[in-house]
Image (tube, coloured by chain):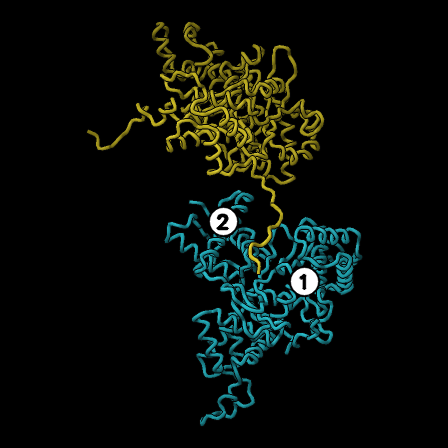
Amino acid sequence: MSILRTVEKKEIPVSRYQRYGIFRNPFPIKPGIQILSSDDRENGSIYLPELRNKETSQFENLVIPKLDGKETRSISLLMDNATRQGRGIGKSSFLFHQFNRINKDWGNEISEGSEVMFATYCSPNSSESYRRFYNLSRLIINNLVEQNVLSIALCRLRVMSGFLDERIYNDVDESSLLQTIGNYAWISAKYNELGLPHFSEHDLKMAVKKQLEKLDIKNGKLIDRLAHFGYSSSDFNKYFTSEIAETEWRKNGSVLLFDDVVTILKASGFTKGIVLCDELEKIIVPLSAQERRAFCEELRYWFVDGNNENSKSSFFNILLVIHPYLQEILNPYWSSSGLERFSSLGGELTQTSTILFEPLTVEQSIPLAKEYLKKSREEKYDGKDELFPFTQDAITLASNKSANIPGKFLAILHNAIEHGIDKNISTLDETCMKDLLTKSSISEAESETRIETIKQPKISL
Amino acid sequence: MNYNYWPQPKYRGIGFYSDASIYIDVLKFGSEVEFFSKNDIEVLLSNRVKGLSFNSTLSKTAYKNLLFELKEFKWISYYYSDNYKNDNFNYDFINREVYAISFVGKQVLNSFFDDYRTFYNALIKELNTLYAIPGWFIQRLWDLNPNQGQVIIPVPSKSWNPQKRKWSDKEWKTEIETIVSQTSQYISSILPDAFPYPKELFIKHTKERWLELGQSKPRFSGEINTEFTPRKRLSQSMREATINYFFGNYNPKTMVNDFSGNKSPLLPRSYSYWCARLEELGLINYTDYNPQVPGRIIYPVSVFRETVNDTNLTEIKYVSNMKGFNLTLFQPSVSNGDFVSLYTTTLYEEYHKLYLLKKSIYVSVQDVRDEVCRLLKLSSNLFNVFLQHIVYLTDNEEEIRYRISLETDIREDQKGGSQRLRKPVYVNKKIVTLIAITKS
């Protein structure tokens, strides 16, 4: 008998949501995506690609190289056309979806087999400052490590080193590289199974290190640390990236990323890297005019035509997510640093380098609601009315009130379900929705209340 | 037609104090000592509070005026005049300016602690007798706008704020004339009766004042390269032109002078002071912060009546206008249930309007107060009284449908400039700055 009280989180057999034919609230309670969450309402796995067909094809057009060899842009922009109405339009969802699409098979499908690609997602941390470009380089490096891109690259190098016997590859495919090739215990077990001669982990690591040493790497410690710790993102972070001093980052952070890391990634067989950089305003807005100018110039140097491995081979394609206001801030510096020619920020060629992200239409929000409801349906639900407990009018009203911004829309529906359960409402129809909306939050879409003309006094003396 | 003139004021100079409690402070001090001198008062009254900031010490003139007024009111007297008959009187005091509280002064002081309104009413009477301004000002407001007496003293709209100019660049430009004209039109369209100033005259007088201000030497440096802010200069010109026109001796409504002789009863500097004082006494109220009106809206919360049969009106018997009507103050009591519910509804409406606009649950209680007072003809003090009352009701009875929450964070815009001097809202003797109301 333990002195500690523990509980097991399991599905409650009779849930309070039963009356609506669902076993949980179908809509997410937290705003935004939590990609590491196991809750599929929150981690972006409920996604209807058809709602964003236009944006997806624009994305592929600008950022993803295809079989036809059309040139893609090193720097592209995603413009959020609805900041006026607040956040929640679905950008992070969209980006995560593309991220998963690319990484599931290292870009095989999306690039029609023409590239071996990875995608990495970066979002600036509000608590850090990004006054210089090296901060962005550091952010990208940390994300590459955390999202296991470097570890996968090392596993690939292991395979390419020829050190391992090819027979063990029978059970391995590209999606499980880390757990198999990257795991010494697994390899060792396989060798035992096949009766092959034993070798130590150290030998394996040295084999990879030898390959790395053949490359032109500027950072002395990198090779050594990668060889020893590169297979585990936490170890590599502990023994390499977090040990780099701030001054070292400042001097060589960008070189580390755009020369050394690119060299290694290329050597491991990757031909393209897609960097999805979200929330650029967190970086740009706090900067002074000079700093913004410096940012644009460095962006150009490292991504377009500087003297570094990335620019020479156009390895990275970066997608910057901006707001219309950010465009206004950046424009002068963008053109004066010469970036306008490569990637039009504000000129007439904007369509050729920008993906415009707009709110959904009302017609699109209904399938979205249906999809969320579907994923939470109880098994015994007969499913004829896909929108139950909502009526179509209620969904339409909610969509209008949230100006068709998915984030808000889903939040309204979440609250409506909870409200309906608490108040024992059988169907959440339009009147019920109206009632709920006026009572609770400020409906932003229509509260642009102009001040009325000045009132006349109520009391006359 | 009545060609009587208003009685001449006995005195025209005015001391500038922050508020009427200064009289009480002196009287209280006087009640605790046998006699006091001007120096004693100067020491007593250093460091007073106005709005959210400390005021520095008063000027010498202000102290002189204060004692002069109190003597005229007969609330204090020269020590020797009451006491020279005493046996052990020290004859040194005969020529010294040494004062003591008088019998009337003691009564006034006691009445203050029972019911401060008695004190204020006595003060209204005394100030009116001495200066003639209080009663006259109210009558003038009602003359200017017979429809409830609301009057606007305008400044240029907030959006007009051009760059600083050199002192030498002092001509009257078309741009300026356009702004003045637009302001006049705008005000006349939203509150038609409140600006009875013909546009051409308004432009003419503003222009004259602008040019006058440009002629003078810059105040601090006298160098011709000093700069001035056009907005400040235009605000001053518009304001002073309006004050001179509205509150000069010549009455625009009756078209004759109110006072015999040619002296103007109210100059711009004394106008500022009188606005604040009359507001404190509960005769008028005003706001500089109405979002739709650039400038100040003044409105009387008092009126001259021939007979008084309304329980909401308090009569001040010794203040009357040329028709012999007495001045009455609008002072509904908290026991007037109808008014309490009107107040509550209006409070909620104005709160809700701001809530929708600012999208925050807590809004500035001063902004709400200014509009509620304007709509209900309340003085700021009464607003506080009613607010306190309904807060008490909501805490203690379930019939009231609202929950009111008051907080005292200092808001950012209160820290700067004139907002620091804006009159705070007091509930249970504490300043509150934020209010939130929910329907329960």
Q: Amino acid at mark 1?
A: Leu
Residue drawn 46% across and 53% down? B341
Within 10 angstroms of label 1, few (less than 14), some, or many (20 or more) residues? many
The answer to whether residue B224 of the structure is visible from this angle is: no
Quickly name the residue at label 1. B144
Task: Tell me which corner region of the image, top left, top right, bottom left or bottom right, holds residue A278.
Answer: top right
- The label nearer to you, 2 versus 1, is 1
Q: Secondary structure at mark 1?
A: helix
Residue drawn 36% across and 26% down? A17
User: Quick check: B368 left or right of A356?
Assistant: left
User: Quick check: B252 left or right of A236?
Assistant: right
Task: Tell me which corner region of the image, top left, top right, bottom left or bottom right, holds residue A55.
Answer: top right
Drawn colour of chain A? yellow
Quickly name the residue at label 2. B348
Give the chain letter for cyan: B
- In the image, farthest residue toward the left: A1
Q: Which mark is residue A87?
A: none
Q: Chain of mark 1?
A: B
**B12 or A160: which is nearer to us?**
B12
Q: Amino acid at mark 2?
A: Tyr
Please determine whether, in this image, residue B265 is positioned above or below residue A420.
below
Q: What is the x, y in percent for residue B362?
A: 49, 47
Q: Earlier in the sequence, mark 2 or mark 1?
A: 1
Q: Are marks 2 and 1 in contact (CB under 8 Å)?
A: no
Q: Chain of mark 2?
A: B
Q: What is the x, y in percent for residue A277?
A: 56, 27
**B53 or A146: which is nearer to us?**
B53
Q: What is the x, y in percent for residue A458?
A: 56, 54
| Same subunit: marks 2 and 1 | yes
